[in-house]
Amino acid sequence: MDYMTLKEAAEKWGVTPRRVNYYCAAGRIPGAVKMATIWLIPKDAQKPQDKRYKKNKST
């Protein structure tokens, strides 16, 4: 299986490496593994949905 780093995933998904690190630590990216201090993310992984925002925001 091919893996990418936090930085590569951040560039691919348009977010910061810190956000990708949060996704990995929270277990929101299936197949992500931590080797020593480096997160390895499968190249075919999809960006998790951002739970900070609601889709249907009613006012």
Image: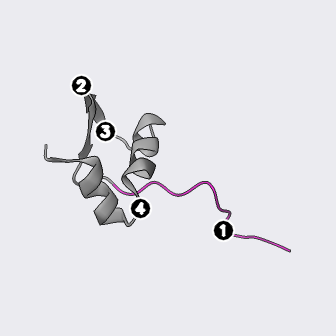
Look at the picture and state if 14 lies above or below 16.
below
Q: Position of residue 17 (x, y in %)?
A: 36, 52
Can you identify the residue that label 3 sits on? 32
Q: Position of residue 3 (x, y in %)?
A: 18, 46
Q: Of callouts 2 and 1, which one flags the residue occurring earlier in the amino acid sequence?
A: 2
Answer yes or no: do the residues labelled 2 and 3 have beta carbons within 8 Å? no
Q: Of callouts 3 and 4, which one flags the residue occurring earlier in the amino acid sequence?
A: 4
Q: Residue at point 28% right, 30% down? A: 34
Looking at this view, is 9 or 58 the one in front?
9
Magenta-drawn stretch, dominant element (helix, strand or loop): loop
Look at the picture and state if 10 lies above or below 1.
below
Q: Residue at point 39% right, 44% down? A: 29
Q: Which kind of residue does numbered mark 1 sit on? A: Lys
Residues at marks 1 and 4, CA–CA distance in whole angstroms? 19 Å
Q: Secondary structure at mark 4?
A: loop
Looking at this view, is 41 or 56 the one in front?
41
Can you identify the residue that label 2 sits on? 36
Residues at marks 2 and 1, CA–CA distance in whole angstroms? 37 Å
Q: Secondary structure at mark 3?
A: loop
Q: Residues within 10 Å of mark 2 (few under 14, many from 20)?
A: few
Q: Residues within 10 Å of mark 3 (few under 14, many from 20)?
A: many
Q: Which kind of residue does numbered mark 3 sit on? A: Ala
Range of the magenta residues?
46-59
Can you identify the residue that label 4 sits on? 15
Residues at marks 2 and 3, CA–CA distance in whole angstroms? 13 Å
Disc assigned to residue 55: 1
Residues at marks 3 and 4, CA–CA distance in whole angstroms? 17 Å
